[in-house]
Amino acid sequence: MQSLFSVGCTAAFINPAATAEPADSIPNREPLRVLVIGSRRGVTSTIQTLYRLGFAEVGEWSPLLPAPNSGEVMSILTRYILSNS
């Protein structure tokens, strides 16, 4: 797998919406999931910070979902990275 930082954070990701092909039909890619869990304020603040850093659009994250711990929420982002296999 290529290092995300060796090729630039956004360059290593493939945007699944940019292609008409199903995700399974594109070779040499694997899913990478980023999970943020915490207070509603903490999760939304982290998502906004990652947006400002150019990591992901706010709309690419899942809606806030209840987390296993009471009072917490979670959101997940799935990206596809290039792999060497």
Image (cartoon, rainbow, N blue to C red):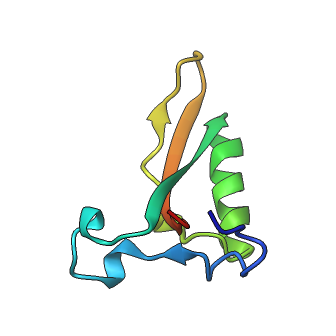
Q: Is residue 66 above or below residue 62?
A: above
Is 2 situated left or right of 14 in this image? right
Q: Residue furthest right?
A: 6
Q: Is residue 62 above or below residue 7?
A: above
Q: Which residue occupies the foreground of this view, 29 or 78? A: 29
Q: Which residue occupies the foreground of this view, 29 or 43? A: 29
Is 62 situated left or right of 21 in this image? right
Residue 42 location, quadrant: top right
Q: How many marks?
A: 0
Q: Residue furthest front?
A: 85
Is 24 situated left or right of 77 in this image? left
Quadrant (top left/top right/bottom left/bottom right) for the N terminus: bottom right
Is 56 situated left or right of 50 in this image? left
Residue 2 drawn at (x, y percent): 66, 69
Residue 58 drawn at (x, y percent): 53, 66
Q: Which residue occupies the foreground of this view, 32 or 53? A: 32
Residue 36 drawn at (x, y percent): 63, 42
Residue at position x 45%, y 65% in the image: 29
Q: Is residue 43 above or below residue 3?
A: above
Residue 23 location, quadrant: bottom left
Q: Is residue 85 above or below residue 75?
A: below
Residue at position x 71%, y 54% in the image: 46
Residue at position x 73%, y 80% in the image: 8
